[in-house]
Amino acid sequence: MFIINCPYCGERDQTEFSCGGEAHIERPKQPTELSDDQWAEYLFMRKNIKGIQFERWNHIHGCRKWFNVVRDTSNDKIHAVYKMGERPPVK
Amino acid sequence: MKNKYSIFSLIKNAFSGHENWQRAWRDPAPKKEYDAIIIGGGGHGLATAYYLAKKHNMTNIAVVEKGWIGGGNTGRNTTIIRSNYLWDASAGLYDHALKIWEGLSQELNYNVMFSQRGVMNLAHNLQDVRDLKRRTHANRLNGIDAVWLNTEQVKKFCPIINTSPKIRYPVLGGTLQKRAGTARHDAVAWGYARGADEMGVDIIQNCEVKGIKRNGDTVEGIETTKGFIKTNKIGVVAAGHSSVIANMAGIRLPLESKPLQALVSEPVKPIIDTVVMSNAVHAYISQSDKGELVIGAGTDSYVSYTQKGSHNIVEETLRAILELYPIFSRMKMLRQWGGIVDICPDASPIISKTQVKGLYFNCGWGTGGFKATPGSGDLFAHTIANDEPHKLNAAFNLNRFVSGDLVDEHGAAAVAH
């Protein structure tokens, strides 16, 4: 349980948000060209990092906008928040 | 040779004030090389080592554990054991485990306090009723005991449930598996550790794995806080930390690790003599032999390795518990904790070879791995020893995420995911 600083609404309790999982997983540009292995990679395989993770959150009980969060999964500390389409901060 | 535990050994040791009990397992330093190494000294890992030694004569093996044995999810679950899963593959897997549970205390000469007190799953809406009835039929076709109970029968089996039609989610019935129940989770780890140790397995505690050494497509050993240990077979049973180990080995897994919470109340006199689970309102409850109510809550929705869990999850669960059991309204909760569970996209485990020769993974048990401990160990041992899965765990391979042949138990298993 932690506080998330929504880039649109400011600081709110984590319960107002919904986590969308790992960020920057790119949708295949040519889905018809993909092999089964590549589909498995895109759909299922996750970094599941213990440490600094880049992830997507949605302020579902607020502005309902998506944005990105850089969070340390070993202690739930948030290091950065940035909007969709923005470049992720360098580690 | 270990002394056998019995009523006579108990009396004998009573005379010396219980100060001369033999050590249950040794505390060896790691050898330079083993035939196989199991990473993770929880119930599943220790069971794997036990069956590798017992059924496959692999005794030159070690279990390495970064903390103390049974200190992870083995000691953090709500100890529920059942096998009433919907799909054939899952039914086969979990009932295999349940059959081993039934004779486990005798086999290990260690009382795991397996208690077949029954597990009841409640239905709160029409779709629940349909799903649970379908599941009882599926269970019976697979030879697993299951019966459907109507509301009066639920009330008769567990009188403290509020079956009033006026509550927010009224009880419309439920299923009962009588062979299901609970066991003492620490004893399971300790019993397997003692049994494995007796056959020569080295159980190395406080030894954290720091790296997996690979030579091309094969494994050569592990780097640990106690030095390098050579081996050409590694079985990883690291639960919430499976992805961390996979990362060391350079392979990818379809897992997400999330905190799952449980809590216990102050101890009271016997009040609930079975296990009651409710999928729809997410509350499950039983009573330990010490008298504490054991309550399972849900997972957080985000990846975290903090072993804590959020307060709102506990709040939701207790709200549901109070609606169903108003009698507990003044109970005090004593302890709350979290365990990190590794969840697969199809909510089924992975007991499998990998693309790296000699590297095996047993993971993805998500929120319900304890019940499978003996079966999981037995089948994983078979997979490691023969470099081939047993027919009962063939469906639980890692390749199913490529082939699409998933074992989708999400929601379909009477499980509070």
Image (spheres, coloured by chain):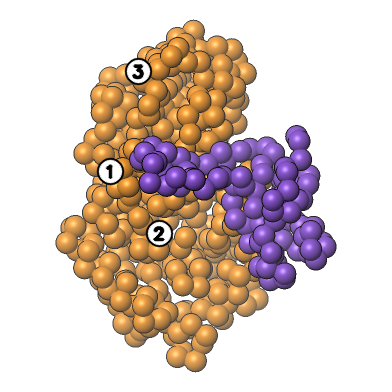
Chain colours: A purple, B orange
Q: Nearer the viewer, mark 3 or mark 2?
A: 2
Residue situated in front as seen by the camera: B166 or B51: B166
Residue B162 horizontal side relative to residue A58, left or right: left
Q: Is residue B63 visible?
A: yes
Q: Nearer the viewer, mark 3 or mark 1?
A: 1
Residue situated in front as seen by the camera: A39 or B143: A39
Cα distance in 3D space between marks 2 and 1: 16 Å
Dot 3 corresponds to which residue?
B59
Image quadrant assignment for residue B228: top right
Instruction: State the SS at label 3.
Output: loop
Pick whichever of labels 3 and 2 is earlier in the sequence. Answer: 3
Q: Position of residue A50 (x, y in %)?
A: 63, 38
Residue situated in front as seen by the camera: A34 or B397: A34
Q: Identify the amino acid type marked 2.
A: His
User: Residue extending furthest top?
Assistant: B32
Circle 2/circle 1 CB separation < 8 Å: no
Cα distance in 3D space between marks 3 and 2: 38 Å
Dot 2 corresponds to which residue?
B410
Q: Identify the amino acid type marked 1.
A: Ala
Circle 2 marks a residue in which chain?
Answer: B
Dot 1 corresponds to which residue?
B395
**Mark 2 and mark 1 on one chain:** yes
Circle 1 marks a residue in which chain?
Answer: B
Q: Residue at x 65, y 76 (%)?
A: B330
